[in-house]
Amino acid sequence: MAEKTSDLVQGTLDMLILKTLALEPMHGYGIAIRLEQMSKGVFRLNAGSLFVAFQRLQRAGLITSEWKATENSRRAKYYVLTDQGRKRLNSETREWGRQVAAIARILETS
Amino acid sequence: MSVLRNISSGLRSLFRRKQVGRELDEELNGFLEMAAEEKMKQGMSRKDALRAVRLERGSLEITKEVVRSAGWESFVETLWQDLRYGVRMLRTSPGFSIVAILTLALGIGANAAIFSVVNGVLLRPLPFPRPDHIVLIYECLPGFGINSPFNAPDFRAFSERQRAFESLAMYSNQRYELSGGGEPERIEAARTSAALFPLLGIEPILGRTFASDEDQPGHSVLVLSYGLWQRRYGADPNILGRTILLDRQPFTVIGIMPRGFQFPIRGERWNGAPAELWVPLSFTSPEFQAWGMEYNHTLLGRLKRGVTLAQAQRDAARVIAEVEELYPAQVVAYFRGLHLDAKVLPYGREIVGSVRTSLLVLLVAAGLVLLIACANVANLVLARACGRQKEMAIRAALGAARSRLLQQMLLESLLLGIIAGTVGLFIGHTGTRLLISLSPAEIPRMQGIGMDGPVLIFTLGLSLLTVVFFGLRPAIEASRTHPNQALKETGRGTTQGRARRSVQSILIVSQTALAVILLTGAGLLLRSFAKLLETDPGFHPQRALAMSIPVPLRAYSHAHDIRDFYQELLRRTAALPGVTSVGASTDLPLRAREHDGVVQVEGRELSSPIETAHSWILGDYFAAMGITLKRGRMFRPEDRLGAPEVVIISETAARTYLPGEDPLGRRLLFGGTWHTIIGVASDVKDSAIEKPADPHNYTPYLAMSDGALADPTFDGLRTLHLAVRARSDPASVLSEVRREIASLDPQLAVADAKTMDAEIQESLAPQRFNLFLIGLFAILAVFLASVGVYGVLSQSVAQRTHEFGVRIVLGARAQDVVRITVREGMKLAFLGAAIGFLGAFSLTRLMASLLYGVSAQDPITFIGVVITMCGVAFLACYVPARRAMRVDPMVALRYE
């Protein structure tokens, strides 16, 4: 391994993917790069978990996909956030905030 | 919504695999290419970049596999693969497959067949609306231990006062001479209240049933059963309104009941013969005054909605106490006080009461056979699984998860179970038809039994259950494979794995135990049956012949006509060259119907009347039937109406009436008159061979009063049963007797002509049926169990060939090798037999009511069974052991 990467907290990958797609539709590699950049290299994702997550989100109706040309004129599958996905992202972000705050409080008091 | 999307997307991956795969391929390739391009921008060569990406992100193939297996459809896909693989595996070893499938199918089929009968007889609701509201109401008379039907005055008083029943109907069986339009024949009919058909809730398919006033005297109408309408009248649609002769009286046909309608349903004790036609049951006013007599009619009731059985029981008890108050004082005095009671019983329950135990025992027996079959197949599956250990090990080594191996093995077993279940369904179908054709007439509701919905569900459930029984353990065993160990072990001639051996041992022990239980059940029934055959029925059936000859009152309206007819018939029959003696009686052994109560014995105080069988006899009845007169004298022609009343009593009667005293010359009060005892006859089995003989009174037929003989309401006394003892072959005498009857009255219909040997055979039909089936199951069980022992020991010998070779080289003699092998098997067999012995000890009491003359814990049977089972097991061990003995050490050691 080139560098040490952290495992994602269980269940957070979906939320992060939704967050990434909230800005604009993106293809798989774009999402991976964006996540790495935003996390400053803490999360490096392998293709397997990423694509399983795409399949899962698509089947849940949170994202859809379409084939489009990239800026390098390559054909790639772009993922698009649906309305349902946007709602889910909002609610999960709120929930995440609540949990992080709660955990922080516990860690501070002990 | 998302579930739907999930399913449709999964289905798309399943059925458009290629396209979905291509898309994923393209997308993943793009992903990896883009990652590689990034690296190449940093100056890597393309080759290095691709390698780095593979390391960082995972290879294309693995990613594809991961993505594909994340959806639910991948489970379906592997299932499908495993299934196809399973079918292939079954086809590659047809011997194993056929034996396993047949063994299971036999067990499943036997259970399906027995269950279809149990379902049809015990579980299926009666074919009437709200069947659980239909009840039987019996009277309990003082001194008579049994529930009795009603008589007319009690019925009238009861129905006027009761509050629990929506409606009540009485009925009783009656046989008629049916003539006009074809040969005269005796048919079984029923006289019923007009309320019966509305109570049952069944409409006729043609015409109508009885109007509510048609059960008043003077209405000669009848309703035909579908069967009789088809059989005798060619389903003539214009039959309504036509006149039919019953006992030579005209009746008008008013309706046809639907196909399959049966009433009375067989099984009710008093009036349980399905009728071919129904006539109204009407009472004349003298009959309504027959207090304390003629308890002949079964009372059926339908509970009011919301009334429970217990409430109805309380109401009936209250009403019958009021009815008791109405009994005239002289009747109460005659019975030396009276205490009536009533019993309300569910009709559906009551009619199956007698066969319930035997059917449930059969079901248990069939279940045990299936368990043994499962054990056998489990052994086969286990042996095969161990043969495939290498395959499993390789698959495990290549990364197959244990759950996946387990799934594979279980699926193969499931496949076996389902195929066996399907074959079993066919066996069950055939078996059901066989059962129906073999079943004794006593089993009620046998018509319409078949492989219906509940039976199919039962069979399917059973097949799945067998999979758990035979497939689960071997699958767990096989999936436990350690690749390393397994690959090592299978190469050399090591002894078999300890775990597998212990499973096989458990299987052998349980098989032997189950077989011992079944064999014990069969043994007890066999001993009972032998005892039954040994039992003296009280008459000599050989060369004896009987038939019932009822004379219709219409043609023989005076008592002397009736007497003359029978006396002339006896005279002519006695003159036939093939006949040694001839007589007649109102009842025959094994099916006595007439009962009486002896209410007083001279010189002894009775607390309550004594119930007795009562026959009126004519001619040389005792000699013809082979009943011996032990003491006193026979009736003489002078013992007739007007002469002093005399009676011959049976030995049991003598013991009951006057224990330890000489009965001759003493007097008995029954039937309203005092009778002097003039003789004592040997006991005769009145109802069944397995039941003790009742006290029995015989009185001369010629002493019967004119009124009783020509009683228009009761024809039992106008139906004499002719008893003929033939010189040689009774069958040839029968046709001669028939000719004599026809020459006396060509219209007369003779019924129930049969030899007394046949009568005994018929009376033992239920026992023979039980013995046959349980015996069959037991033989099957022992066979399967011994095949099981044999199979396991053969495998063990084959695997220990090397060991035996070494032993022989080191100086072991042939018999030592045999002893080792036999001891291995017999240890398990003994243990199984011991467990089976204990199991049988606690289980056989359930069948105590089916046994006769042996206790449910009969030591001879128990010991005999254990010895038999161990003997069979020894043979099953000895044959493979002989093979071990013949091991050639050189071959065995070189064989490596």
Image: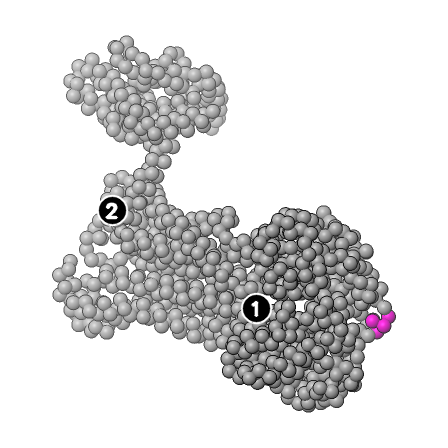
What residue range appears in magenta?
A: B329-333
Instruction: Judge by depth and name the residue closer to the eye, B524 or B763.
Output: B763
* Disc 2 to disc 1, C-alpha distance: 55 Å
| Chain at numbered mark 1 | B
Residue B66 place in picture, x, y as percent: 31, 30
Q: Can the viewer see residue B881?
A: yes
Tag 2–tag 1 contact (CB < 8 Å): no
Q: Which amino acid is tagged 1?
A: Ser
Q: Which amino acid is tagged 2?
A: Glu
Instruction: Judge by depth and name the residue closer to the eye, B363 or A42.
Output: B363
Q: Is residue B595 left or right of residue B182?
A: right
Q: Nearer the viewer, mark 2 or mark 1?
A: 1
Residue B18 place in picture, x, y as percent: 29, 27
* Disc ID at residue B391: 2
| Chain at numbered mark 2 | B
Image point (79%, 79%), residue name: B673
Alpha-carbon neighbours of circle 2 within 10 Å: few (<14), some, or many (≥20)?
A: some
Up/down of B674 relative to B141, above or below: below
Q: Can the viewer see residue B128?
A: no
